[in-house]
Amino acid sequence: MSVTASGPSQDRADVELRVPADGAYVSVLRTTTAGLAARLDFTIDDIEDLRIAVGEASAMVLPEADPASDLLCRFWLMPGQITVSVSVDAAAPAAPDQDSFAWQVLTTLASAASVQSGEGRFGVTMTMRALDLGDDLEAALGAGR
């Protein structure tokens, strides 16, 4: 397992995590995701939603992984926003199943999601935005009226 951190860039991820393409390592991705989202001041509920979404993305890509390949998770961090890409080497990936339970959960939890298939890779990318604290306060005050 390796973790690489770098400065923000359009093409290069801020954090990259590579683990064996095995379901036993999904918890590592989920924990890393939660830690990074916490650094961006996501709420506990948003962090849990993101952890679930990363688990569902992993459930979509792992069956397509070539033997002995890696599960690559890349993170792009911005204030109030995190983009996560989960992908595997896949010589012949199946067409993405956007009717699957995993996809439905993922698209419900994330602000945006997409599937990438081709060029020997299969992956899912999702973006989640943290709620603006002003919006939370306004909603809480409005609910109390």
Image (cartoon, rainbow, N blue to C red):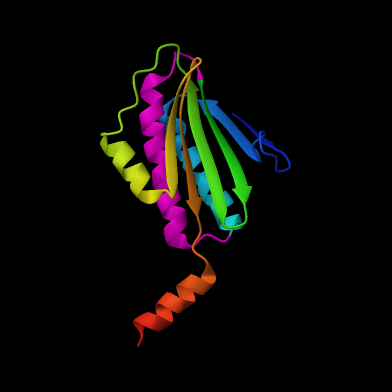
Q: Is residue 64 above or below residue 130?
A: above
Q: Residue furthest right?
A: 7
**Residue 32 visible here:** no
| Nearest to the observer: residue 94 or residue 40 | 94
Q: Is residue 27 left or right of residue 18?
A: left
Q: Position of residue 67 (x, y in %)?
A: 44, 13
Q: Residue at x 58, y 50 (%)?
A: 36
Q: Residue at x 47, y 32 (%)?
A: 25
Q: How many numbered circles are shown?
A: 0
Q: Position of residue 42 (x, y in %)?
A: 52, 59
Which corner quadrant of the image does residue 45 belong to? Answer: bottom left
Q: Which residues are magenta?
A: 41-69
Q: Residue at x 49, y 63 (%)?
A: 131
Q: Is residue 93 above or below residue 134?
A: above
Q: Residue at x 44, y 14 (%)?
A: 66
Q: Is residue 86 left or right of residue 49?
A: right
| Nearest to the observer: residue 37 or residue 29 | 37
Which corner quadrant of the image does residue 90 belong to? Answer: top left
What secondary structure is the magenta-colored segment mainly?
Answer: helix
Which corner quadrant of the image does residue 9 belong to? Answer: top right
Q: Residue furthest bottom?
A: 145
Residue 94 part of the magenta-drawn span: no
Q: Is residue 23 above or below residue 105?
A: above
**Residue 64 visible here:** yes
| Nearest to the observer: residue 128 or residue 16 | 128
| Quadrant position of the N terminus in the picture | top right
Q: Is residue 66 left or right of residue 38?
A: left
| Quadrant position of the C terminus in the picture | bottom left
Q: Is residue 130 above or below residue 85?
A: below
Q: Position of residue 130 (x, y in %)?
A: 51, 59
Residue 59 part of the magenta-drawn span: yes
